[in-house]
Amino acid sequence: MGKVRHSRFDCTPGCSVEAAIALIDGKWKSVVMFHLMDGTHRFNEIRRKIPGVTQRMLTNQLRELEEDGLVDRKVYAQVPPKVEYTLSPLGQSMGPVLLALKDWGDANIDRFGKPVHAGSPTELEAA
Amino acid sequence: MGKVRHSRFDCTPGCSVEAAIALIDGKWKSVVMFHLMDGTHRFNEIRRKIPGVTQRMLTNQLRELEEDGLVDRKVYAQVPPKVEYTLSPLGQSMGPVLLALKDWGDANIDRFGKPVHAGSPTELEAA
DNA sequence: CATCACGGTATCCTTTTTGACACTATGTGC
DNA sequence: GCACATAGTGTCAAAAAGGATACCGTGATG
């Protein structure tokens, strides 16, 4: 059987933190989940909301989120393909984590490097 | 100059989530910070509270946390060496994130793999 | 004297993660 | 016909992260 991705938590007070962080360990996972908090999205909707993610990586991380039970995936048998992604109840229960990350990021993001997508519409509008 | 570790956030609503998660991206960082929420610790105190971490990695991640301004490090000029690590104000402001992770982990940790340190004192006591 | 504690460093290696690029089948619009 | 949209897959490479192992200087202890 394939490698188990989450299977080494120790029984110390920190291990529940470790368990939680391990589930959203993946460069885009927390951002994907954050966007899904707004409701069901299709693949390219998510993709458009996350500049910088490649199709390959988005697929990978959505699959892992689905495997971990954090995201539900619904495929409609039609052409062109239509696939909907939704936070599962378990994924929704991560809401407080995601909101805490967002709040903290909002308060502190300017401490860290400049946005790399200079010239993007929002940046131009601000100019 | 070396690679800048945090320097590519895009101006989308998700980027503040991305910024926050990037700071605690590192296998042991969130657990270290969680333990430091209890107050100042010395190096080996932290190490003993985190089974599985190697000295090498703990040093690395403490250094990165210090570089990012999340942890304060105080060296006492004595023998044997004494170094104290404390959450900085910025690190403390991550409290809600860490607590949200802990709460979520506590509620859900049994969904994921078994603890790997079977036989540890707490495990034996439970038996 | 040997062992231990402290808090590391140095070096190298392995594993994992991420990304680049090309490709896919169908329908639609021009 | 071509370009586009949809939601991917396949393959390979590069980069990054994490870990294994040995070693360090000082003092304390038995």
Image (spheres, coloured by chain):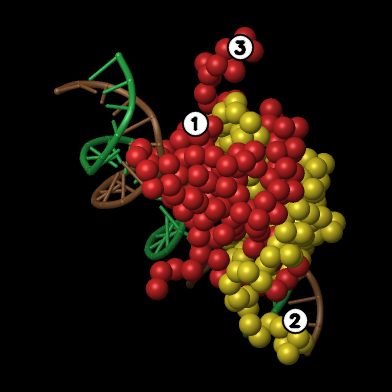
Chain colours: A yellow, B red, C brown, D green
The residue at the point 58 percent across, 31 percent down is: A9
Q: Which residue is mark 2?
A: A122
Question: CB of mark 2 within 8 Å of CB of mark 3?
Answer: no
Q: Which residue is mark 3?
A: B125
Q: Nearer the viewer, mark 1 or mark 2?
A: 1
Q: Is A121 in front, or is B74?
A: B74
Q: Residue B48: give its label.
A: 1
Q: Is residue A53 visible?
A: yes
User: Where residue B22 sits in the image (x, y, percent)?
Assistant: 59, 58
The residue at the point 65 percent across, 48 percent down is: A24
Look at the picture and state if A11 lies above or below A127: above
The C terminus of chain B sits in image quarter? top right
Q: Residue A32: give its label.
A: none
Mark-to-mark CA distance, 1 and 2: 47 Å
User: Where residue D1 sits in the image (x, y, percent)?
Assistant: 62, 84
State the SS at label 2: helix
Q: Residues within 10 Å of mark 2 (few under 14, many from 20)?
A: few
Q: Is residue A25 visible?
A: no
Q: Amino acid at mark 1?
A: Arg
